[in-house]
Amino acid sequence: MITNRLRVLDLFCCQGGAAMGYHRAGFDVTGIDLAPQPRYPFRFIQADAIDYVREHGAEFDFIHASPPCQRYSRAQKIQHRDHPDLIAPTRAALEATGRPWVIENVEEAHRELRDPVTLCAATFGMRTYRHRLFETGGTFTFTPPRHPAHWAPLTKMGRPRAAGHFAHYVGNFSGVQEARTDIGVPWMNRDGIRECIPPAYTHHIATALLASRLEVAA
């Protein structure tokens, strides 16, 4: 009998935005990050994510990976900072597990990702856009929900959200409590919110994963 207590490995987990979506879908989540993550709300192991998945990835039912996005961000390019490409080695490690997986990253990483699906916060009723790309593998795919038109103007980076505008929760933004409520991450601080994946995104992915497993079992 298939249950929804699948074991999910959450690589480069940070403060657990992605993890919460899987948890809310009923999954058992373990987070891996090289840095301490005292705000991570589930089981956490401090380790190198790629090394860990190479050794233990096959022990899990599904793997989510969010390699650091600094290499692809506009701000880092402007500042001429160089960061390693972690998408390719992460993909290679995931493929070697034989498990279904997803890699998440920012829009600027689209050239590094294979046939990615875009998710938008407005699709899930949030007052922000926050596009994120998702590459899938290991026989798993999912269909994105309808992407609504961006009808609301976006408040300039870091400023309080103006009436009728959507917020831009990046940099040293104001309105941390509003962002927590809007994105659904009440345990996070500003640092976590800046880069987090809204849990609604991974809840959608988790629902698709459960549906695909039921189809196989039918």
Image (cartoon, rainbow, N blue to C red):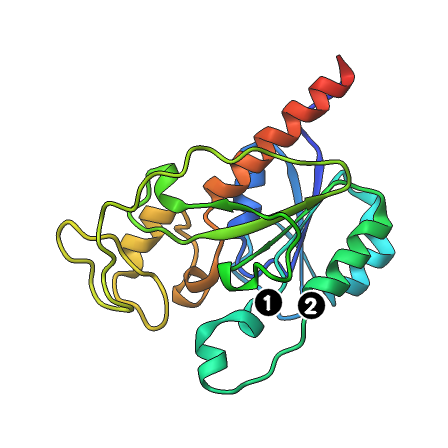
State whether residue 200 is above or below residue 109.
above
Label 2, residues with CA under 10 Å away: few <14, some 14-19, many ≥20:
some
Q: Which residue is mark 2?
A: 86
- Quadrant of the rendering where the C terminus is positioned: top right
At 38% from the left edge and 48% from the top edge, which residue is drawn?
183
Q: Are marks 1 and 2 in contact (CB under 8 Å)?
A: yes
Q: Nearer the viewer, residue 204 or 114?
A: 114
Q: Pinpoint residue 19: horizontal percent, then vertical percent.
A: 57, 47
- Where, quadrant-wise, is the N terminus in this rendering? top right
The location of residue 85, given as percent across then percent down, is: 67, 71
What kind of residue is marked 2?
Leu
Above-or-below relation of 161 to 183: below
Name the residue carrying label 1.
Answer: 68
Helix, strand or loop at mark 2: loop
Q: Position of residue 158 (x, y in %)?
A: 28, 69
Q: Is residue 73 left or right of residue 91?
A: left
Instruction: Using the numbered discs, state the Cα–Cα distance from disc 1 to disc 2 in whole angstroms.
Output: 7 Å
Image position of 50 (left or right of 202): right
Could you say which quadrant of the image residue 47 lies in? bottom right
Sequence-wise first label, 1 or 2:
1
| The quarter of the displayed image where residue 70 is located | bottom right
Name the secondary structure under disc 1. Answer: loop
Residue occupying image coordinates x 34% and y 43%: 122
Q: Position of residue 172 (x, y in %)?
A: 33, 73
Q: As displayed, is residue 158 above or below residue 65? A: below
Q: Say few, some or many: other residues with alpha carbon within 10 Å of mark 1 (under 14 / 14 to 19 / 20 or more).
A: many
* Residue, far bottom: 80
Give the amino acid at mark 1: Pro
What residue is shown at x 39% (from left), y 50% (from top)? 186
Which residue is the extreme one toward the left? 163
Residue lying at 35% horizontally and 52% vertically, measured from the top left: 180
